[in-house]
Each structure stands twice: as C-alpha cells, then as structure tokens.
Image (tube, rainbow, N blue to C red):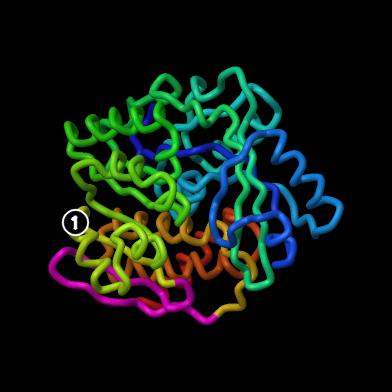
Amino acid sequence: MATVDLFAIGNALIDQEFKVSDDFLLQQNLQKGTMQLTDGDSQAHLYNKLKETQLYKGQASGGSAANTTVAFTALGGTAFYGCRVGNDDLGKIYLDGLNDAGIQTAEKSVSEGVTGTCMVLVSPDSERTMHTYLGITAELTDQQIDFTALKTAEWLYIEGYLSTSDSARQAVKQARQIARENNVKIALTLSDPAMVQYARAGLDELLDDGVDLLFCNQQEALMYTETDNIEQALAKLQLKSKYTVITLSSEGALISDTEHSFQVPGRQVTAVDANGAGDAFAGAFLYALNQGESLKAATELAVLISSEVVSQFGPRLDIKSYATLLESFQKECA
C-alpha cells in the first residue's frame, strides 16, 4: 500500500436524493436539516412514499468522510478510505467509485451484509434532511480497516457520524493511537446537529484528548458548547483543537488558531442542495493546508469548492471540476 496524505474513516452510504416539500417533511415527522437513523423496513416504507409523491433526483455514493476524501483527492492529494460495505451490488458500486476517483481502499472493507443507504431529502430552501439505514457500516470495526497507510500519512480524518457505533469508536481509538505514535495530525468533523443532540457522549469519545483540526457548522458549534453566541462557542472549541473551523453557510467561515480568529466571507450562489457542502469544504481545506497554504487561503479555496457543490444536486462535483476550480483559484491568487 502506497503512502497517502489523508487517511479517512467513515460510514459507507449510497445516497438516494429526492426534492421534497416542507409539508412532506412534516407529514413524515422528519426534523429538517438533520440526520435520522432508521431500520431497513422503515426506510423502505419512506422510499416508496418518496417515489409516489416527490421528485427523484438520482443515486450517488455518499458518506461524509468519503465525500471529503473525494474532494481532497480530486484536487491533487492522495488518500485511503477505511469503511465497511456489504458483499452486494451497492457495495461494489461504492468501492469502485472511490477507486475510480483515485482513492485507496482495502479488500477487507467488504463483508457479509447489506450496504448502507441514505434518503437525502432536499427542501425548497436547499436544506438537506437525511433518513439513514446504516446497514453493515453500523458494525464497522478495526477488522475492516487496514491501518498500514496511516503510519506515514499526514492527516487522520474522522467523521462524527461514527459516534453512534460502539465498535466504530473503538476503531477510531486505535487509529488515534497509531496517529499519535507516528506524529500524524488528527482532524474531526462533528458532522450533524443530530450527532451533537443524540450522540454527545460518542462525540466526546471521538474527540478524546483533543484534535489538531476541528470542523463544525454554526448550529453544531452552539449546541456542542451549550452557548448562545458564536464567540463563546469558538472559545470553548479552542480548548479541544489547535485549529477550529466553523462554517457559516452563505456567510463563509470563522477560523481560529487558538490565539487569533478571523472570518472569510462566503460566495453569492444560487443554493440548490446543501448535501455534501460541509464535506467538500473540509476536503478542500485539508488539501490546501497540506500544500502549505495559509489558513486564509485554505478557507477561501474551501468556500469556493463548497459553494459549487451547493449549486448542484448531489454531494460531489464531477471529478474534473475540482481541478478546474483549483486552477482558476490559483490564477486569481497569483
């Protein structure tokens, strides 16, 4: 296995995207803007309702950390993704998609079971609400992850959605130990307000004694720190991370290095689908930081990439689009 810049661990999910009305979310008792875990039968029932009454937009390989890894690799980095898929057609589609994007995976990621799926419901204001059946990824353990490349990586990246799984948290604990022993920097994303609300103890375990880089959005930051303004939230998060990035939707992002903080403005775009925007932001930010760019430049690139993701349906851009955007960004900065 070749050396990689980024070693990521996360859930493997196939997204089914629908454009839905706010009334539909209310009728189905779904909390807008969050992720809700469910079982296979309940998701199948919802899927049938969606197909009957809402607009189907297509299928895409998803998973928060996977989306981040795709952005990171498409911009020019190298990456490995540790996950668990079933030995079914969706599992093959999922891993083939990552490999086609240049991301390394391990054969041991495939095991008996059903690959996880996520119903991504995009409301008229472009907000995404997710109804997730984890399938076999709910049982992700260290046995499905080849940690070889982690020992020489630059970054370990952990998604907060893993906070709901006892076995996944144990795998992350092992990954954190390997990272610390080999001077690999650790980044983590809180992932979703629902993780903060319902899996707070799991997030605390993933964060452990702190990380080098923490990603979250404004709602997650306020909820996790139990504060009512972003400045107080940032002050508390600084105790957990060397660098903290709080995304502010169309307003850009707030960044801190424990001593200083600053805000980078957002870009004016027509928002279509917020699914995957935060993931793309993290991937672009990590890529730029790994290339030696300043925090400001890394944030500006991340804002550019994530705003393009928001402007279309689906959690990822066409692979070639990332490089095109990077080239235009570099010309503007020259």
Expressed as whole percent of the image width and height from the top left, the position of residue 303 reads 43, 70
**Residue 269 in view:** yes
Expressed as whole percent of the image width and height from the top left, the position of residue 2 reads 37, 31
Residue at image location 51% in from the left, 25% down from the top: 109
Residue at image location 35% in from the left, 68% down from the top: 299
SS under mark 1:
strand
Who is closer to the viewer here, 293 or 235? Answer: 235
Question: Residue 122 vs residue 190: left or right?
Answer: right
Question: Residue 252 vs residue 20: left or right?
Answer: left
Who is closer to the viewer here, 101 or 233? Answer: 233
Quarter of the rendering occupied by the N terminus: top left
Residue at image location 19% in from the left, 64% down from the top: 257
Q: Which residue is mark 1?
A: 242
Identify which amino acid the numbered label 1 is placed on: Lys
Vertically, is 91 above or below 295?
above
Which range of residues does the magenta coloring cover? 249-268
Q: Residues within 10 Å of mark 1 (few under 14, many from 20)?
A: some
Question: Residue 17 vs residue 293: left or right?
Answer: right
Quarter of the figure with residue 246: bottom left
**Residue 334 in view:** no
Say if the magenta span includes residue 267.
Answer: yes
Expressed as whole percent of the image width and height from the top left, the position of residue 140 reads 47, 27
Expressed as whole percent of the image width and height from the top left, the position of residue 151 reads 26, 31
Question: Residue 30 vs residue 199: left or right?
Answer: right
Say if the magenta span includes residue 118.
Answer: no
The total of numbered circles placed on residues is 1
Who is closer to the viewer here, 11 or 284? Answer: 11
Q: Which residue reaches farthest right?
A: 52
Quarter of the rendering occupied by the C terminus: bottom left
